[in-house]
Image: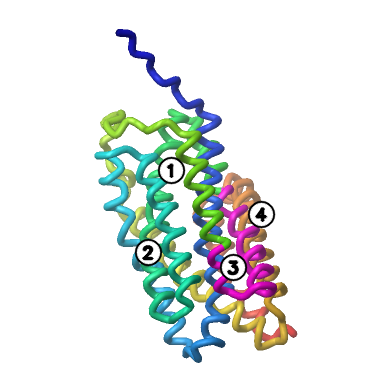
Amino acid sequence: MTIVAAPPVSSRRTLTVCGSAHALHDGFTDLLNVLYPLLQAQFGLSYAAIGALKAVYSGAMASGQIPSGRLAARIGSVKVLVAGTSLIAVGYCLAGFTGSLYGVIAGLLLAGLGGSTQHPIGSSLVSAAFPGLASRTALGTYNFSGDVGKVMLPALFAVIAASLGWQQAMIVMAAVAVAGAGLILATLAPADPHGKTAEARQVAGQDRPWAYWLLFAIHVADDLVRSGFMIFLPFLLRDKGADLPTIGLGLSLMFAGGAAGKLVMGWVGARLGVVASVVVTEVATTLLILAILPCR
């Protein structure tokens, strides 16, 4: 009996599919910023309640990342990534079909768990496909692809929600997630769960632990500010008279600026250094957020 081995997946295909998955997952996460004002209007929610909804999704996504990586090591990365993308579809369908606040909460919990699979698995697949210094460019492309999804899906969701309602828009997004899961399953061969992981056992940053913890603290502070701004920007735009498509456009422009900033700061960082680049971006972010508040 002859056993024919499946042909290996090319590095370019791996980057393309993982980048597409990154775009979908990041877009599914950030389109929720368009959904929150609609939920507030329908259910009469306070800003604290909106923050709690955000915490449900973000908490599920954060808590599921380490278990996702461990599960991928046992049953295969591609299977877990497909299952996670499908779980997003289930969560969005639940929220859209029920139309109730409890259904939305349960849907956000499921979608958050599904979204937790993409970052640890997608980045590891890309790193494995591009060993050595080539991984830097590949991972940069992979990270940039997430911003593409942030630009496109919130705007698309806003247009559909303005035309059909938020429940129907959630169902349409669920269909997009199902298509994405099918694409991943059809184009990526199952990854070896016992791949080469012992080549570099040295812990990143252990030679300068203070630098690691400094960057860690900056990342936490930056993420807190960025998440809060993204959540409440649609409410600010609404209070200034913007309609739903305009709110979606505003979010897409913000994410497009983030994508452009990643490209520009790579050039700036090479000339100013890491510390100076971080200081410049954090100060600029603070000033621009304050400048938006009085604008009309």
Single out the mark in the foreground, 1 or 3.
3
Badge 2: residue crowd in 10 Å (few <14, some 14–19, many ≥20)? many
Which amino acid, mark 1? Answer: Ser
Image position of 280 (left or right of 198): right
Q: Which residue is mark 3?
A: 169
From the top left corner, tell me how far across and down residue 175 is, in percent.
Answer: 54, 56
Who is closer to the viewer here, 291 or 80? 80
Q: Could you tell me which secondary element the residue under label 4 belongs to?
A: helix
From the top left corner, tell me how far across and down residue 71 is, in percent.
Answer: 27, 46
Q: Within the image, what quadrant is residue 239 found in?
A: bottom right
Q: Which residue is mark 1?
A: 123
Single out the mark in the foreground, 4 or 3.
3
Check the image and report above or below for 76 versus 92: above
Q: Earlier in the sequence, mark 1 or mark 4?
A: 1
From the top left corner, tell me how far across and down residue 103 is, in percent.
Answer: 41, 75
Image position of 168 (left or right of 73): right
Circle number at residue 110: 2
Find the magenta span and give its range: 144-171
Q: Within the image, what quadrant is residue 108 found in?
A: bottom left
Residue 167 inside the magenta-drawn segment: yes
Which amino acid, mark 4? Answer: Ala
C-alpha separation, residue under disc 1 versus residue under disc 4: 21 Å
Where is the C terminus found, in terms of image quarters?
Answer: bottom right
Residue at image position (48%, 78%) is 99
Q: Earlier in the sequence, mark 4 or mark 3?
A: 3
Check the image and report above or below for 158 versus 142: below
Single out the mark in the foreground, 1 or 4.
1
Q: Which residue is mark 4?
A: 260
